[in-house]
Amino acid sequence: MDAITSTRSKMVDGIFARLGYRDAEVECIMKEIPRHLFVDSAQEHDAYKDTALPIGFGQTISQPSMVAMMTHELAPRSGDKILEIGTGSGYQTAILSYYTPRLYTVERLADLSRRAQGLLESLNLRNIIYKIGDGSVGWESWAPYDRIIVAAGAPVVSDVLKRQLADGGRLVIPIGDRDAQHLLRVERHGDSFVETDLGECRFVPLLGTQGFK
């Protein structure tokens, strides 16, 4: 095992020790994904610290522990149709791509989307469908989705996203104001939606017609 792989493995082990639970599948995938490739070269020395890092355009790559927690709470199953809102660096995208034959991801910023696509394709992750546009409205063309994950803070859980969630599906989304949010897990049962508060978090704001203006 080379030094980078060893450091990455230790980071993942430490994250789940602090979270207080195990998720063998998420752990295995996170140990495979080279997070240092998803950050600016000047930030590579911090890539395996449990911290968010800037990726340009006022955006960040989330803390690895938050990525681990969100993936665990999303609980994707093999074959699920998954929608990701906020491609960003592509790091969370890479992890989710291991679960599904088709991952749909939406990014508002064209430069970020194209950069992430180039990197993910270089890693031979080619089961991802990209869209540049307003992620706050989801991606109606391919709905419904078994799982939806939102990597930006929204003011409310919009009815638009709820409608795109399949019966029995699950949505993980930060809800709050521009500066701080609570992470929610939303589960659909017919026309009912059950929300579980997973604790405080902090994300960049979700901009768009169903987000912040």
Image (cartoon, helix red, strand yellow):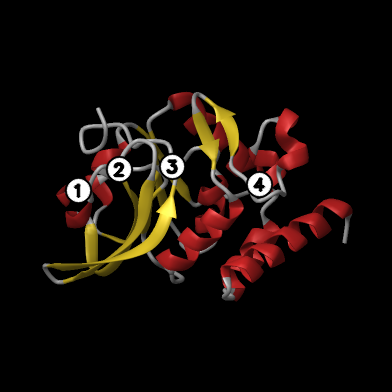
Q: Can residue 152 be seen in the rendering of this structure?
A: yes
In this picture, is 143 found above or below 192?
Answer: above
Q: Which residue is mark 2?
A: 154
Task: Check disc 1 and report the residue beneath it.
Answer: 158
**What kind of residue is marked 4?**
Leu
**Quick one: SS at disc 3?**
loop
Look at 57% across and 46% down and name the residue there.
91
**Image quarter in which the N terminus is found:** bottom right
Closer to us: mark 1 or mark 4?
1
> Which is nearer the N-term, disc 3 or disc 4?
4
Depth check: 182 or 150 in front? 182
> Position of 125 compared to 177: left or right?
right
The residue at the far right in this view is: 2
For disc 4, the marked residue is 123
Name the side, left or right, on which 183 lies relative to 101. left
**Residue drawn 36% across the image and 61% down it:** 81
Question: Could you tell me how far apart the alpha carbons at marks 1 and 4 are, in whole angstroms?
Answer: 34 Å
What is the quadrant of residue 172 in the picture? bottom left
Tags 2 and 1 in contact by the CB under 8 Å rule?
Answer: yes
Task: Point out the tag, 3 or 1, that comes first from the N-terminus.
Answer: 1
Q: Which mark is residue 203?
A: 3
Asked whether the residues under the numbered discs 3 and 1 touch, taking CB atoms below 8 Å apart as contact, a structural biologist would say no
